[in-house]
Image (spheres, rainbow, N blue to C red):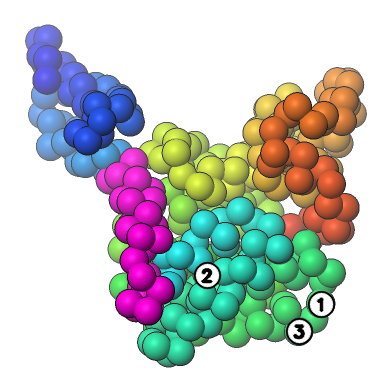
Amino acid sequence: MRKGGNRVRITAQLIDATNGAHLWADRFDGELEDVFELQDKVAISVAGVIEPTLRQAEIERARRKRPDSLDAYDLYLRALPYAFTSMPEDADKALPLLAKAIELEPDYAAAHAIIGFCHEQRYLRGGLQEETRIAALRHARLAIAGGSDDAAALATAGFVIAVCGHDFETALTAFDRSFALSSSLALALGFSSVVRAWKGDDAIAVEQANRALRLSPFDHLLYLPYVGLAYANFAAGRFEETVAAASLAIPVEPAVQRSSNLARCRAGLPRPEPRSEGCGATATRAAARPHRRQRDPLGPLREPGK
């Protein structure tokens, strides 16, 4: 902490004590009388970085356990890496693990939320099957009903209900409940930013997306706030910003290619060349699966100003 006159600066750094790796650093400036508010900002920021790091550590721990000793939480953790790829083929691998988890604990809200998310991915990218959409909504509603103390489950379920049911009031209520439990959860901010952008709350979408990116730059679902930024900037007529955000989301979420291409046309920018094999496995897999481009994730893309 440094002080100059009535101003104070807090510099924070997060280091992995096991290997010395630098995870995060930031600085916070403010008036001396606001020092407690600054301390709160530091705590929230650190929590946002720690959450996905701890989640990954728990996933690795669950992977090391013997299959016959797995409990519902272990099964849930083992499913997460498959669920978070946003690929229907991987969702198919996650679902049996999650089914075992809710067999052991039928009211496990977190597992129901991820089951709903997996079915949402399978629905949008695996053929738009009505029974898959219904399954996504059923498990999302079970997650909301039983997840009163789980911010991630509420946010994930809210997103699924928005996408598969277009029930935005229920989705926004779920997000609000999630934020009441944890205002620093980047996952919830990312999900909410996408829904807010599609609903027309562009300013809120941009603010939430930027907070998510600032709080948790290493999250597995980092593409979500970029999707929110792409939609919100397009609707606001900020086409170059749309292209910039969409280019960071497209390798995992090709559906935003549509807003990116429209924005390029509006801004007089050329479309990018198709990605080559050398651009990485994720981009190659995305380009190789045309079923992922069947539908914009949240319906018709709003025209700028609407």
Residue type at tag 2: Ile
Please tell me which residue is depicted at 83% across the width and 52% down the height of the picture. 289
- In terms of depth relative to the viewer, which is nearer, 46 or 32? 46
Q: Which residue is mark 2?
A: 114
When the figure is inspected, residue 233 is found, relative to residue 87, above or below; the finding is above
Of all residues, the one furthest to the top in this rendering is: 4
Choose top left, top right, bottom left or bottom right for residue 297: bottom right
Q: Position of residue 108 (x, y in %)?
A: 40, 81
The answer to whether one can see residue 110 in this image is no
Q: Are marks 2 and 3 in contact (CB under 8 Å)?
A: no
Q: Position of residue 127 (x, y in %)?
A: 84, 69
Real-space Cα separation, disc 2 to disc 3, in angstroms? 17 Å
The magenta-colored residue range is: 47-74
Mark 2 lies on a secondary structure that is: helix
Horizontal side of 127 relative to 192 (left or right) equals right
Please tell me which residue is depicted at 39% across the width and 88% down the height of the picture. 104
Q: Position of residue 214 (x, y in %)?
A: 42, 34
Q: Residues within 10 Å of mark 1 (few under 14, many from 20)?
A: few
Q: Are marks 1 and 3 in contact (CB under 8 Å)?
A: yes
When the figure is inspected, residue 189 is found, relative to residue 169, above or below; the finding is above
Q: Which residue is mark 3?
A: 131
Q: Which residue is mark 1?
A: 129
Horizontal side of 246 relative to 113 (left or right) equals right
